[in-house]
Image (cartoon, rainbow, N blue to C red):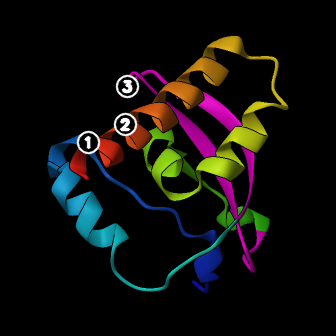
Amino acid sequence: MDVHPSRLKMYADDSLNVTEELIDHIASQGTLLAVEAIVEHRMNSDMHAYEVKVKWLGRETVENSWEPLKTMSEDVPQLLLQYATTTSDDVFRRAVTTAIDSKQSQRSTRR
């Protein structure tokens, strides 16, 4: 069976014991991607945290991926703020500003 790689999805069965450390390791491998836009958000009820759907620069729409709000607040805070101003979800907007403010205060205490 022929399958185009852009149609593949990551699979992590609960029994596989996929740890955050393993996810971080896999995420740090391979190609560096640039965020073109944030196109959607949702609450991940399993993780009790928001995620944002990212459109990657130069990639097909089917390759958009859900990324943790915390990660995106560190990597692309201005783009995240820009997206947050377009939504009517007040709880999400507060979560965005809290995540960004938290990261900025961590940076200032390290200096």
Tell me which secondary structure the magenta stretch mostly adopts: strand
- x and y, in percent, of residue 105 in the image: 37, 37
Left or right: residue 111 compared with residue 83: left
Alpha carbons under labels 2 and 3: distance apart? 28 Å
Tell me where the magenta segment starts and ends, as one range: 36-60
Tag 1 residue: 109
> How many C-alpha atoms fall within 10 Å of the one at disc 3: few (<14), some, or many (≥20)?
few
The tag earlier along the polypeptide, 2 or 3, is 3
Asked if the residues shown at circle 2 and circle 1 are in contact, with their CB atoms under 8 angstroms apart, the answer is yes
Please say if 100 is above or below 20: above
Seen as rendered, the residue at the extreme front is: 111
Q: Amino acid at mark 2?
A: Ser
Alpha carbons under labels 2 and 1: distance apart? 6 Å
Alpha carbons under labels 3 and 1: distance apart? 31 Å
Which residue sits at x=26%, y=53%? 111
Which residue sits at x=50%, y=37%? 100
Label number found at residue 105: 2
Which residue sits at x=46%, y=51%? 74
- x and y, in percent, of residue 68 in the image: 47, 43
Label number found at residue 10: none
Tag 3 residue: 46
> How many C-alpha atoms fall within 10 Å of the one at disc 2: few (<14), some, or many (≥20)?
few
